[in-house]
Image: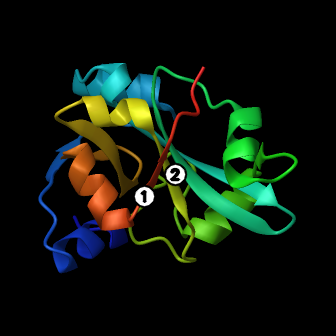
Amino acid sequence: MSTRAISYLKRKKVPFEVLEYEHGEKGAEFAARATGFPLAQTVKTLVVESARKSYCLVLMPGDRRLDFKQLAQALNVKRTAMVDTATAERLTGYRVGGISPFGIKQRLPVIMETDIQRHAEVLINAGRRGMMLKMSPRDVMGALNCRLESLAW
């Protein structure tokens, strides 16, 4: 089965491998357990409001938390916050638990936590619950034109 994310990567000729698993609950922890992949290498795609009606995606390792103050500093804004489920789904066109940074409905800037770069491979959502993409972080960066920032605690 294909998703907008897979179509996007194929169009850009970015290499990836699809891993499917039985989706039981949302979150990187469940995906890591279900696929047998390390949590530190299972990437979460977070939809964040960076200023009034201004949004971005933040890619975080599954075992780390986003420091909203550091993100605000990096974006030169007063504060940042997670968006609600309805906003995340409207902006990306994906259901929460299956949000991929690839092939989203509205073009948003993407920021990747620098720790992700230290791995040879990561898992990142393919745009459907229970489906992940195994890719090189370098290919993720190239496909999305990511900005690297240290945002984890």
Q: Earlier in the sequence, mark 2 or mark 1?
A: 2
How packed mark 2 is, by other alpha carbons closer than 10 Å (few <14, some 14-19, many 20 or more), is many
Answer above or below: position of 62 versus 43: above
C-alpha separation, residue under disc 2 versus residue under disc 1: 5 Å
Q: How many marks?
A: 2
**Pointer 1 residue:** 146
Q: Position of residue 34 (x, y in %)?
A: 30, 25
Q: Position of residue 116 (x, y in %)?
A: 36, 34
Q: Is residue 22 visible?
A: no
Q: For the N terminus, which image quadrant?
A: bottom left
Answer above or below: position of 73 versus 3: above
**Pointer 2 residue:** 111
Answer above or below: position of 44 versus 12: above
Q: What kind of residue is marked 1? A: Cys
Q: Quadrant of residue 56?
A: bottom right
Q: Nearer the viewer, residue 31 or 47?
A: 47
- Looking at the image, which residue is at 44% across and 22% down? 29
Q: Nearer the viewer, residue 87 or 70?
A: 70
Q: SS of the residue at dot 1?
A: loop
Answer with left or right where residue 110 lies relative to residue 87. Answer: left
Q: Position of residue 6 (x, y in %)?
A: 25, 66
